[in-house]
C-alpha cells in the first residue's frame, strides 16, 4: 500500500475573559471606593507589566547590541563556509565582502568551498571541514540523522514556487488530474511537495500513477507522463511555449521548500557569539536584497557569475521567495512534516530523531531574531 502524507495544521487559541459589574442606590459609595481601589490596583499591575516589558526589551536590545559590537580577539580562526551552486545568501555575504566587513577587527578569516550537492556538504561536516553551510532541508535532515555533527540554526529563504506541479494544457483541475501519470523523483523535496499539492486538491497519491524518475522534463515533453513535479526552471521553455502550465504549488498547499542554514555543533557551542554574528550578516544580505529590484538583480547577476548558471535561473527559481534568516512558523511546521515524510519513506539512518535533534534556535535568539 502506498504511503500517503497527511498534512494537517492544528491551531490552539486561548481567550481570557474579564467581567465587571455596576451598582446603584445606597451601595454606590462603597462600590465607588472598591472601583477606585481596583483601578489603583490595575494601574499598578499595568505599570509593573510595562516595566517588565521595558526591561525585557532592554535586555533583548542589549543582547543584540553586544553581538553587533562583538570582536573576537582569541587565537586565529579560519571559518569554513560551504555552498552549492543554487543556494545563497551566505554565498553573497562572502563574495560581496559583508562577512569580512562585519568581522573587521576580529581574529577570523573566511574560506568558501563549493559542492555538487547536499550529501557532499554533509560529508564535509562529518570530517570537520565545514563550519557553516546552506542547502535543502531534506539533505540537511538526512545528515543530522546520520550524526554528521551539525544542526539547522536558521534558514536562508523559503519558496512556495520552486517545485510546482506542472501539467499538460488539457488538465485544468483536480478532476482532470485523476488517473494521470505524474513524474517525480521519489523521496525528494519535490515528492513531499507533490503529496501536499494532491492533498490540497482533495486527492491522494492513489488518485494518480506515480512515475519515479530523475528525467521529469523528457517524460513530460514526450507525453509519456501528463504531469511532473520538479524545479520550476526546468519547465520554463515548455511553460513559455504554452505546452504546460502550473496546476499547483506551495501557495495552494501552504507549504514551501526551505533552504536550511546549518552550523557545526562543536563550533557553534565553542563560539556562540561568532555564530550569532554570522547569522546577522546573512540577514543583512537578505535586507539588502529586499530593498529594491535593482539589488535583487545585482544579487542574481553576481550569483550567475560565481556559479556559471544563467541569471534567469535564479530569477525564476527564487521569484517571490521569502528571504530572511529566521525560521517562520510555516517553516517549522514544514520541517516537522518533512521529518515525518522522510521517516515514512525510510529515508533516515536514524528514524528516531525528533525536531529537537535537528534544530538549535538559541543563536537566532542571541542575534535578536526570535
Image: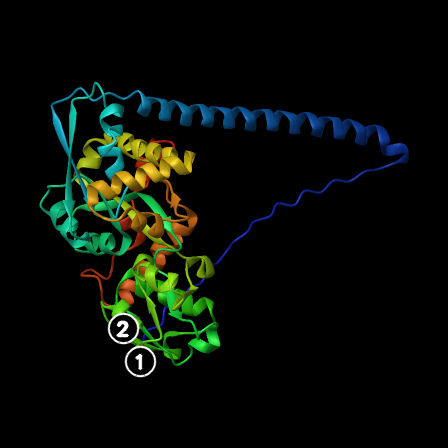
Q: Earlier in the sequence, mark 2 or mark 1?
A: 1
Front residue of 44 and 191: 191
- Residue at 22%, 64% in the rendered image: 347
Tell me the element at label 2: helix
Q: Position of residue 147 (x, y in %)?
A: 16, 52
Tell me: residue 281, above or below residue 179: above
Where does the image place residue 57, in percent across and percent down from the top left?
A: 46, 26
Residue at the disc numbered 1 = 1
Question: Coloured how?
Answer: rainbow
- Point out the frontmost of discs 2 and 1: 2
Q: Which residue is mark 2?
A: 219
Q: Are marks 2 and 1 in contact (CB under 8 Å)?
A: no
User: Dividing the image into 4 quarters, which one contains the N terminus?
Assistant: bottom left
Vertical order, 42 against 354 (above or below): above
- For the residues labelled 2 and 1, the Cα–Cα distance comes to 25 Å
Give me the residue at 67% from left, 42% from top: 18
Q: Quadrant of the C terminus?
A: top left
Q: Secondary structure at mark 1?
A: loop
Q: Residue furthest left?
A: 127
Asked if residue 179 is positioned above or below residue 161 in the image, the reply reads below
Amino acid at each position: 500500500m502506498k504511503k500517503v502524507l497527511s498534512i494537517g495544521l492544528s491551531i490552539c487559541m486561548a481567550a481570557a475573559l474579564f467581567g465587571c459589574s455596576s451598582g446603584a442606590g445606597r451601595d454606590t459609595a462603597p462600590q465607588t471606593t472598591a472601583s477606585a481601589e481596583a483601578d489603583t490596583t490595575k494601574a499598578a499591575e499595568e505599570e509593573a507589566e510595562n516595566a517588565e516589558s521595558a526591561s525585557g526589551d532592554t535586555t533583548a536590545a542589549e543582547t543584540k547590541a553586544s553581538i553587533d559590537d562583538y570582536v573576537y580577539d582569541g587565537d586565529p580562526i579560519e571559518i569554513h563556509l560551504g555552498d552549492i551552486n543554487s543556494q545563497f545568501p551566505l554565498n553573497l555575504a562572502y563574495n560581496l565582502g559583508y562577512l569580512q566587513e562585519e568581522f573587521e577587527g576580529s581574529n577570523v578569516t573566511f574560506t568558501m568551498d563549493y559542492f555538487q550537492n547536499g550529501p557532499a556538504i554533509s560529508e564535509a561536516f562529518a570530517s570537520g571541514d565545514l563550519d557553516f553551510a546552506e542547502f535543502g532541508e531534506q539533505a540537511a535532515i538526512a545528515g543530522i540523522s546520520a550524526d554528521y555533527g551539525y544542526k539547522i540554526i536558521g534558514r536562508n529563504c523559503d519558496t512556495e514556487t520552486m517545485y510546482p506541479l506542472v501539467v499538460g494544457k488539457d488538465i485544468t483541475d483536480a478532476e482532470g488530474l485523476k488517473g494521470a501519470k505524474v513524474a517525480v523523483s521519489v523521496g525528494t523535496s519535490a515528492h513531499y511537495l507533490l503529496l501536499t499539492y494532491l492533498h490540497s486538491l482533495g486527492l491522494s497519491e492513489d488518485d494518480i500513477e506515480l512515475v519515479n524518475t530523475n528525467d521529469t522534463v523528457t517524460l513530460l515533453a514526450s507525453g509519456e507522463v501528463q504531469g511532473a513535479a520538479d524545479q520550476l526552471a526546468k519547465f520554463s521553455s515548455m511553460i513559455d511555449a504554452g505546452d504546460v502550465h502550473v496546476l499547483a504549488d506551495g501557495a495552494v498547499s501552504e507549504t514551501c521548500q526551505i533552504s536550511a542554514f546549518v552550523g557545526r555543533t562543536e563550533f557553534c557551542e565553542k563560539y556562540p557569539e561568532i555564530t550569532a554574528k554570522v547569522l546577522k550578516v546573512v540577514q543583512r544580505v537578505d535586507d539588502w536584497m529586499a530593498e529594491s529590484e535593482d539589488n535583487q538583480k545585482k544579487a542574481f547577476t553576481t550569483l550567475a557569475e560565481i556559479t556559471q548558471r544563467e541569471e534567469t535561473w535564479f530569477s525564476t527559481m527564487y521569484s517571490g521567495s521569502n528571504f530572511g534568516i529566521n525560521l517562520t512558523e510555516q517553516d517549522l511546521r514544514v520541517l516537522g512534516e518533512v521529518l515525518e515524510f522522510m521517516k515514512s519513506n525510510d529515508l533516515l539512518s536514524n528514524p528516531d530523531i525528533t525536531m529537537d535533534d535537528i534544530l538549535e534556535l538559541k543563536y537566532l535568539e542571541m542575534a535578536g531574531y526570535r
